[in-house]
Amino acid sequence: MAKGILYNSAGEARLARTLYGPGIQDKEVVVGVGVETAGTMQENVHQIGPLAMDEDRFILCLGRRDVHKNTLFLAETFAAYKEKYPDSSLQLALAGPGDGTFGDIHPDVVDLGLVSEEEKEALLAHCLALFHPSENESYSRVIMEAWFHERPVAVHRNCLATAMAVQTAGGGWLAGEQSEWIDLFAQIDILAEEKMHILGMMGKEYARQYAVWDRVIDRYEQVLDLTNKTDDGPGVVQKEKGRAVHQLLPGFAFGDAISNQAMLIRDYLRAQGYESIIYTEALDPSMTHEAELFSREKLPVDTAVIYHHSIGSGLMDYLDSLRGPRCLIYHNITPPSFVVDHDPALADQLQQGLDMLPRLAEIFPVSAGVSGFNAEELKHHGFADPEIMPICVDPAKWNIPAPVNRMFELQDGRTNILFVGRIVSNKCQHDLIEAFSLYRRFDPGARLFLVGGYDDKDPYYKRLVDLITDHGLTGDVFFAGKVDDAHLHAYFRTAHLYWSMSEHEGFGVPFIEAMWFDIPVLAYKSSAIPETLARGGILFDSKGTLEEIAALAHLLVRNHSLRGKVLAAQEERCNDFLANQVFPVLDRLLVKMNVAV
């Protein structure tokens, strides 16, 4: 299996994650491509065809003159600009190889054809800006060349490689529709030279990072050095086997976020040299290879234990008898008021879990919440100095193929809106269905997928079915149920928006997973969600105007500029949940437990 995947541009890397899932993320390295410039060789070039370098004001389009590179589109757009602004002195210069000519489209379209290196350098040095309208690029040398000449650049927003470079650098503009390109021509025609220079300098700084051979070669050398690292993942160092640290959970089930976290902690502990087993009061039959049913004989009271608390259970007497090193990790408990009307038994179990907290504070001298929101609740119940240890969300989980048939079905041109979570009232799927019905006014072909377990006898589920029928959304809102990772992979891979109306989340793993899949997140500002998303996603703090929320959702799906800004922030945020960021907190907890090896 490949140790690494090298990309010319960040756009290539994002496209690869879209195609193959975020599991390849830890192998990605954007190395760039070295670009040489000819220095001052253009100084003796004063005239190229009808263009006077020191006198004429022109936009440059440099590269193959080809319909597939959008050359015709740009020339026709420039003609439309001149029709709208007939007094403009601006010209459009086309330079590069290709068949046919574009000069007859408008008198101010100057088709120079293939030019010499000296002429190319002169054009780059004297143009107002470079326009690069192609939608199909993995890397663009001419953009870097323009930036080395301190010239700003305009690119097509649909081309990931060039659009991400321009956005990251701040060295120009993005445009898509013809009207946007016309507006750009008009803007550049009157923009102050100083502002143009600032944009060009910002681009130059980016080019120095990704188009200077010394820095490109440095990255190649770093990649080669990385082939010597162990296969244990970031932050994991194999150590000799030492003492035991086991984990205890009320329940352990397939697809459950707490169970997944426990497995990652177990694997980390084992890699660090500990003996570590997961014990649980209730065990999903499909997960017997990952955990064992709890008994006092298997887990004596003097054993080092990490207990995950998330609900009431029959473990209280055992926990009260613990005498060995111990730590509690709190995943939060849904307020019983959310479920008491339709599931009183669950409400009682949730209340029991809350009632246990003051006594657990006396039992566990070491504790952590998976969010600051949870840690504050621990403090409220008397826990001393709880740590914050987020749930580790490893993108390597998605190194699995998505079902081909499901991928084909989900990529039929319709907008896919996704929410992942159990069908339960605190997740507020009823509000999401209401808002989605309004969203359909903007996007009639859209559909909503609710992925998560449900009981078809549950009154809340029946309420949702009735709501779907009342809004005429049968066939447009789908209950996918609890799915395996391969099918969940397909839903994430094909979603255009992750939309949450949930009013209680102790952490929210699906939010992080959505960010790994480059899906913009729109969420109601509640509980731990603002902390989990941090600088990622877009939050709203009121459900009073569902029409406005639906309009915002449509903007996130269709507005490329807004979507790009959100995705850039999310891409940065989701790195905070990798093992090398999370497990140093676990190391501190082990020190506090006095079991560090």
Image: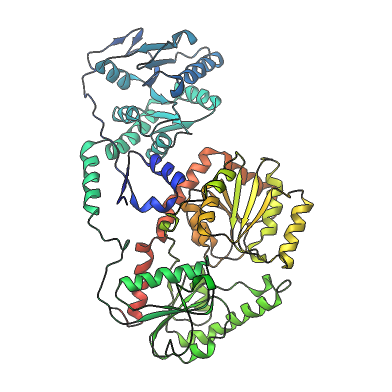
Camera-nearest residue between 472 and 366: 472
- Position of residue 449 relative to residue 170, above or below, is below
- Position of residue 460 relative to residue 168, above or below, is below
Residue 524 can be seen, yes or no: no
Colour mode? rainbow
Residue 541: x, y in percent? 61, 57
Q: How many marks?
A: 0
User: What is the quadrant of the C terminus in the image?
Assistant: bottom left
> In the visual, does 271 lie left or right of 174?
left
Camera-nearest residue between 439 and 385: 439
- At a point 44% along the width and 66% down the height, the residue shown is 390
- At a point 50% along the width and 83% down the height, the residue shown is 382
Residue 537: x, y in percent? 52, 52
- At a point 38% along the width and 65% down the height, the residue shown is 582
Camera-nearest residue between 387 and 231: 231
> In the visual, does 20 lie left or right of 540?
left
- Position of residue 208 relative to residue 246, above or below, is above
Residue 293 can be seen, yes or no: yes
Residue 514: x, y in percent? 51, 53
Residue 489: x, y in percent? 51, 53
Q: Quadrant of residue 336?
A: bottom right
Hey, which residue is sitting farthest right in the picture? 470
